[in-house]
Amino acid sequence: MHQTKTPVQDQQLCTVILLGNLVAKPDIRYRTNPVSAVTEIMLATSTKWLDKKSNQYKEWTSYHPIKVEGDLVEQALLTANKGDIIMVQGYLSKIKPSTNEVKSHSAMIHATYIQKFKKGYTQTVNQIYCGGQIASTPQLIKTQNNKSLAQVNITINQQIYSIFKQCWQNLLIERELHVWGKQAQYLVEHALVGDSVMVEGKLSYLSSANKTQFIDAKILHCFKS
């Protein structure tokens, strides 16, 4: 009997780069089989912008929950303390926060690289580069400031290496994408479910109780399926 095979979705890019301040000293634990260090940290990054109404600069701080495993913990976080500058590269994950410091968030970033610097002042970095497919019909919203905002869900198919399972795995992630201005109008008028997108932007979190994570697009490229 002939069976139709489900097509395999193309693997897609997903890279998160953060540079910010450690909110609290890491609580490092150890798992067995195999023995490996693990910790969950919170990293703070800030965004400044000019409020045209008041002609003053305003600042918004985002708090990013991050899971760090294996050698990365011992290489960079054994002597880390609150306020240290931390650089992280990682990917979006389905990991649910388990410690009290990060339980307020619904999703975490999984670190693949981490580096610690001494305390001091530096401009923070919050960047995400990802590819994906449109998973819902884009919705256009007019904000209180009469700006155009498009909201749409995208799926991202990542290939990741599991330190705990010691193998490569495919990880399918869905996130809400926010697109502004002319790009928002274009997305609503032309994009369809199944179309591909490439996004450059930053990670943000809704002000809801569980701090739902979403992608705030700066530059969007859309490709027909």
Image (cartoon, rainbow, N blue to C red):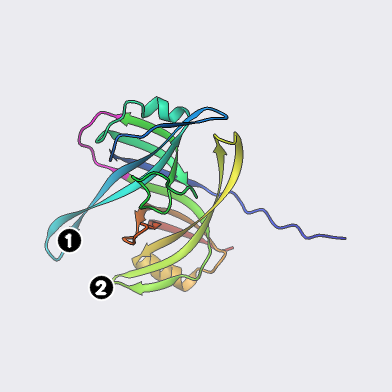
Quadrant of the frame with the N terminus: bottom right
Image side of residue 116 versus residue 196, left or right: left
Q: Nearer the viewer, residue 68 or 170?
A: 68
Residue at the far right in the pictured view: 1
Quadrant of the frame with the C terminus: bottom right
User: In the image, residue 222 lies at what x, y percent?
Assistant: 49, 61
Name the residue rendered at 60%, 39% in the picture.
168
- Report the amino acid beneath label 2: Gln
Q: Report the magenta residues as a range.
A: 117-125
Name the residue rendered at 67%, 53% in the picture.
8
Q: Where, by quadrant of the figure, is residue 57 drawn?
A: bottom left
Dominant secondary structure of the magenta stretch? loop
Q: Is residue 39 above or below residue 59?
A: above
Question: Residue 90 — which label?
Answer: none
Q: Which residue is mark 1?
A: 51
User: In the image, residue 130 lies at what x, y percent?
Assistant: 47, 50
Image side of residue 33 versus residue 58, left or right: right
- Report the amino acid beneath label 1: Asp
Q: Is residue 87 above or below residue 54?
A: above
Q: Which residue is mark 2?
A: 144
For label 1, the SS is: strand
